[in-house]
Each structure stands twice: as structure tokens, then as C-alpha cells.
Image (cartoon, grey):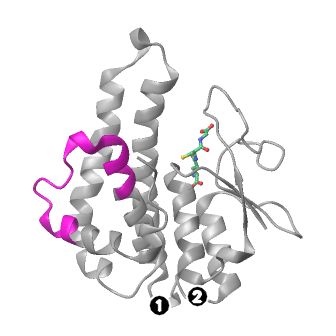
Amino acid sequence: MQLYHSPTSPFVRKVMVTLHETGQLDDVEIVPAAGTPIDKGSMPVSWNPLGKIPTLVRDEGPALFDSRVICRYLDARAGAGLYPEKRIWEVLTLEALADGITEAAVLMVYESRCRPEEKIHDFWVEGQWAKVARALNVLETRWTSHLVGPLDMGQIAVGCALGYVDFRHGGRDWREGRDGLAAWEAAFAARPAMQATRPPL
Ligand SMILES: N[C@@H](CCC(=O)N[C@@H](CS)C(=O)NCC(=O)O)C(=O)O
């Protein structure tokens, strides 16, 4: 299989962590890709018309995207149990919540990277950060018991979301007032799969 990849993409990181955690790293060839919504660059548009990564090209069957589909496929392929049937709705909702954080954080980056300075809309950027902040509060107050349970895809998505917030929005100090989540993140970030996939500085 070929995985279209960038080392700074938090959505690609979800897939890479899943590959590490499920022992499938050697089954995938990494194909570098780069682009933005205004310049498709080397994005795999012939496999994924949305021009986004991660995209997974398989030896048989259509290419898979997005990160949620790829991670679920890899979990099923390995029989790894990252989507336990008993807690499936919680796991999927937690993954969606984490991906929502990541999505808002990525949009904030695109706003400054893809627009001329005079067209950057500060209220829109702050609106995205408000989504991130509300979601982080909910992780802190409602999801702690789930986060400390057995490894699942919701936790992986949260770990990657928090890693990306640190990577691109470190100045916002998301840990302030969220001690429980901060402690969880420190422990989760020490996992070998998270260490091996840290975005380059
Ligand atoms: N929902 C998608 C989001 C993927 C995504 O937005 N990836 C970014 C890189 S972090 C991308 O490909 N951006 C290029 C674009 O939006 O044109 C997923 O979970 O895979």
C-alpha cells in the first residue's frame, strides 16, 4: 500500500500512529505530498479528488480517504480492536471531537498562509479558536475516564489533535486551566508511536 504523507499533517499522523500501534508499518510505502486549498502542489488528486492527505492507495480496491476511513480500515485489517464494539459510539464521537479540534486548528493556519495579509479575517480565526477551546474544555470535564481506558482510536485522535495545537498554536497555552488533560497528554505523548511521529521542528 502507498500512503500519501506529510510529516506535519496531524491527520496523516493519526494514520501513522495507527500503523505503529497495530504493527503494520512495513506494509506501507510512504509517498511525500504537499499542497494547500489554493495550490494542489503534489497532492494525490488522481486518487483523491479532494486533493487531501492522508490518502491510502491499496493494491486492490479503490484508494481510501479520509483519516477516519483509513484508520478504521487499518484497524480491521490488523484485528487490533481500536474500535471496540461495546464503546463504539463513544469512540467515534471522541474521534470526531478530536478531528474537529484539528480541523479548526488547520483552518487557522490556512487563513494566515493562504491569504494576503490584508484579507486575513481575525474574527474568523478567533471563531475557530473558540471551537478548539470549547472542545478542549469538554475533553477536560467529560472525557477523562474514557481517555484513561484501554487504547482506542478516540484517544489516538485526541493525542494527535493536542500535538498539532502545540505544534502550530503553542503560544495559546491550551494547558492553562486544563490540568487533567495536560497530564493525560504528557503521558500519551510518551508512547513510542507518538514519539516516532512527532512533527519536525
Ligand atoms: N477530514 C480529512 C482532513 C484531511 C486534511 O485536511 N488534510 C490536510 C493536511 S493536514 C490537507 O490535505 N490539506 C489540503 C487541502 O485542504 O487542500 C481527514 O481526516 O483526513
Q: Please identify the quarter of the rendering in which residue 31 is found.
A: bottom right
Residue at image mark 2 = 80
As drawn, the residue found furthest toward the top would be 118
Q: Amino acid at mark 1?
A: Lys
32 relative position to 139: left or right: right
Q: Are marks 1 and 2 in contact (CB under 8 Å)?
A: no
Where's the N terminus, which quadrant?
A: bottom right
Mark 2, ligand 1, within 8 Å: the answer is no
Q: Position of residue 163 (x, y in %)?
A: 36, 57
Which residue is depicted at the point 44% across and 85% down?
A: 87
**Magenta span includes 173:** yes
Which residue is depicted at the point 51% across and 87% down?
A: 84
Q: Few, some or many C-alpha atoms within 10 Å of disc 2 (few <14, some 14-19, many ≥20)?
A: some
Q: Main secondary structure of the magenta part?
A: helix
Residue at image mark 1 = 86
Magenta part of the chain: 163-183
Q: Amino acid at mark 2?
A: Ala
Looking at the image, is mark 1 or mark 2 earlier in the sequence?
A: 2
Along the viewing direction, whichever of 99 and 14 lies nearer the viewer: 14
Q: Position of residue 117 (x, y in %)?
A: 41, 13
Q: Position of residue 113 (x, y in %)?
A: 47, 26
